[in-house]
Image: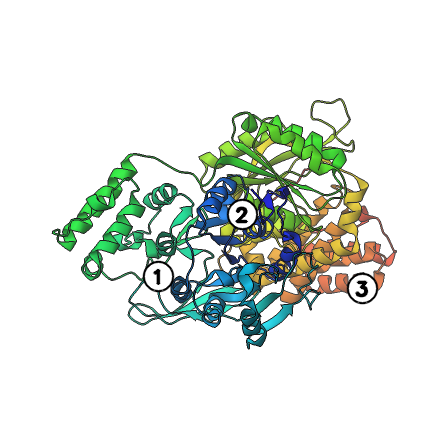
Amino acid sequence: MQIYQDIWINGVVKTKGVRDCESRYEPIQALCKKYKRPISVLDIGANLGYYSSRLSSEYGCTSVMVEGAPVYQKALSELIVQQNCRNKLILLGTHLDLKKVKEMSKCEHFDIVLALRVVHHFKEPFDAVIEAIVSLGDHIFFELPTASEDKVRAMGRVQKELADHSKVLSPYKFEKVGEYPIHVGSDMSPMYLVENPKTGISQPFMGSPRKIEHTIISTFDDKKMVKNDPLNRGVLENEWVPGINLLTYHSLNGLYPPRKVISEQIAKYPLPEGSPLTDIRPWNFILGGTSLTLIDHTSTTTSLGTQFRDNPRNCMANSALFINANIHPIHAMDYNREPEQTEVWLKQELAKLKKQKTQVHTERYTVSAIVSAYNAERFIHGRLQNLLNQTLFKKNQLEIIVVDSNSPQNERSIVESFMKYGHVVLIRTSERETVSRAWNRGVQMASGKYIINADADDRFSEYALEKMANELDSNPNIHAVYGDWQLTGTENDTLDSDQKRSAFHYPPFFPPMFFYFQTTSYAPLLRKDIFEKIGFYNDELEVFADREFMMRFSASGLKAKKLPHILGLHLEHPAGLKHLEGKTGAMEFTHLIDRFLAPEPFARLFGHDSVPDKGMLSQLYADLGSLGKSLFGIDNRPEARIFASEKLFAKALETDNRNVTALNNMGILSCLRGQQQQGLQLLERAVESGKEDQKSAIQANLDAGKRGSTVFDDYNWFEPENLNFQVQVRN
C-alpha cells in the first residue's frame, strides 16, 4: 500500500511517505514556536497523524485528529498507542461536512487548524467550506492539491477564494515567505496561512439549543474565556483549557482515548464538596487527550430533572454511557421514570462503578526520569545503565525519557539500543534548545506521577528513586523530596568505585536559602501535578531555570523534605563552573535575585501570608544576608554568595536605612573588597544607629577598615538576630 504521509513515531520517521511532510511542517512549526502557552490543534483529514503527533511531541500541543477513512482510522489507532505523546492526542472517526464544521465552530476554539489537501473532498460550495473552516480558530493552514491530480479541476476556484480572502496573511507559492519560512519539495502546492482571530463561542456544546456569548481573549502568551453569567456570579474570566468538549468527542465518533478509559476517569473524578450530580454530564468536561477537566462545576444550577424533560433521550444516554461504559443505552432509557427517580438511578449506577474499585491511571509509572542530551555521547550509556539498575525500573515503575536536543553526537543510536528493555522513550528535536525547554518536553510527555531530572553526567544510588517515591507516597502534603550527594571530578564515576570524593550535605528545606544555592539538590523528585499549579520551567533561562522553578515552587507555598540519605553522585567539572559564572549566568542570577527580593515574594519564601512591617522586613533581609557568611566558602564560587549577601543588605537598608546589622556587615564587605571609603561611611552610620553593647564591636571594625585590612578575621561580623539556621554542607 502506498502511503502519503511519513509514519512518525517518537522523533523517528519509521516509514517514508510520498509527500514531503518535513517541508510542510516548517511553517507550522515556526508558528508554534511563537506560543508561550499550551495550545490546541485541529488536524482535518489527519491521514497517518504525522503533523499532530509531531506537534504534540515537540510542543506539547493538544492535537485533535479528524479522519473519516476506516483504513486510516485503524492505522491511526494503532500508531497513537506507540507515541510517547499519546496523552495529548484525540482521534475523531468521522468525515467532516459543512454542517459539522459549522456546529463545531460554535462551541470549539483551536489555536491552529490544519486543512491540508482536504477542501476538495467537501461536496458543498468551496467558498462556504473555506469560510466555515476559517471560523474554527485563530490560524488556519490550507494546502491545495497539485494540478497533476484529477480531483482538482475546480481547484482554481478554491485558490482564488483563498487568494482573494480578506484575511489571508501570507500565501505560500513555492518560496520562503516572511517569518514563516518553507522549503518547497517537489510535490508542494500552494499553501496558505489565514490569520483570523476567533473572538468567541456561541453554544456551550454541539447541538445545544442554548445560545451564549462567551468572549475569547487569545494571544501568544495567554488565552482566557470571559463569560457573562448574570444568574450566578456576573462576568467570569477563566483560563482556557486546551482540548474539546466531551460531547464533541461523543458526537463526532471519538475513537481515542477509548471510551472505557474516559468513563472510568469520570467515575473517579473528584467533584468539589457540595457539587451537584449534574456536573458529571459530558458537556461539562473538556477532553485534553487522556486528561479530563471539569468546567463550570460551581455555576451549574439547573436541576438534572429539568434537563431530562428538555431532551431525556440524549441527556440520559450520554450521561449513562460516560459514567459507566458497561450500561447499555437501551437499558438506560426508561421514559416512564420521573426525573427525580432518574437522578436517583444515575447516582446508584455511579456508586456501583466506584465500588468496583477499578482505577485507570493516566500515570502508567511511579517515576518518569528525564534525561536531556546534547554532546553527551560519552555519558549517555552510563546514565541509562544507571537508570536501568534502579530498583523502580526492575519493578516496571520507572519511565526513562531522553530528550535529544538535536545533538551532533551519537546519543540517538545509544538510546535506541536501550529501547529493547522497554520503558525507554526517545524524543529528538529538530534544533538545539535550552535544557529547561528539554525538561518541559519531558514533563509534558511523562506518564509518571513523579518527575525527576536525571542529568546525563550524574548517577543515582540504586535505591534512590524508590526511597524518594515512597516518601512522597506516604506524605501527601509534601510536594518534593531530595537528599545528599557525593561529588566527583571523574567522568562516569560510580558510587562503588575507589575514587576520592567529597560529600555535599543539603540543609533541611528552608526556601530563603535559595538566594545562596540550589538547596534542594541537583535532582529533587517532584509531584507531576505541581506543574499544573505553578507552570513549567522558564525555558528562556539557560543556567538558573531549576533555581527559578524551585523559588517559584516555594513562594507558592509548596513544601519539600530532606531525606537523610546519599542519593546520587554529581560530576563537578570546569565547564559547568564556567557556565555558572559566565555572562549569561551572571545576568540570570541578578534578575532572579532582584525578582525575589521584592517584598511580597520574599515574605512568601519565609512563609508569611502578607508582607511584615518595615522594621521586621528589613531585619529579615539583613539576617538572611548575615547568614551568607557561613556559605562563602562552601565551594569554588564565593563571589556569587557574597553578591547575594550584598544585595540583601542593600535591600535591608532600602527598607530601613538605620538597620545596624546591614550597615555593619555591608561595611565589612566593602572594606574587604578594598572599597575603604564606602565601607567606613557605612560603619560610621552603624556606630550612630547601634545599641551601646554593639558600638565597641563596630568601632573595632572602623579601626580595622582605617588600617586597610582585608582579612576577614579582623572584623566583627554581626550574626542573624532572628534566624537560627546552621549550615554545614561539605566534608
Residue 659 is left or right of residue 70, and the answer is right
Q: Which residue is depicted at the point 33% across and 53% down?
A: 282
Mark 3 vs 2: CB contact within 8 A: no
For the residues labelled 3 and 2, the Cα–Cα distance comes to: 70 Å
Between disc 2 and disc 1, the foreground one is 2
Q: Amino acid at mark 1?
A: Met
The residue closer to the viewer here, 32 or 467, is 32
For the residues labelled 3 and 1, the Cα–Cα distance comes to: 71 Å
Q: Is residue 210 visible?
A: yes
The residue closer to the viewer here, 561 or 389, is 389
The disc placed on residue 678 is 3
Q: Give the mark, 3 or 2, whose residue is nearer the N terminus.
A: 2
- Circle 1 residue: 206
Mark 3 vs 1: CB contact within 8 A: no
The C terminus is located in which quarter?
Answer: top right
Disc 3 secondary structure class = helix
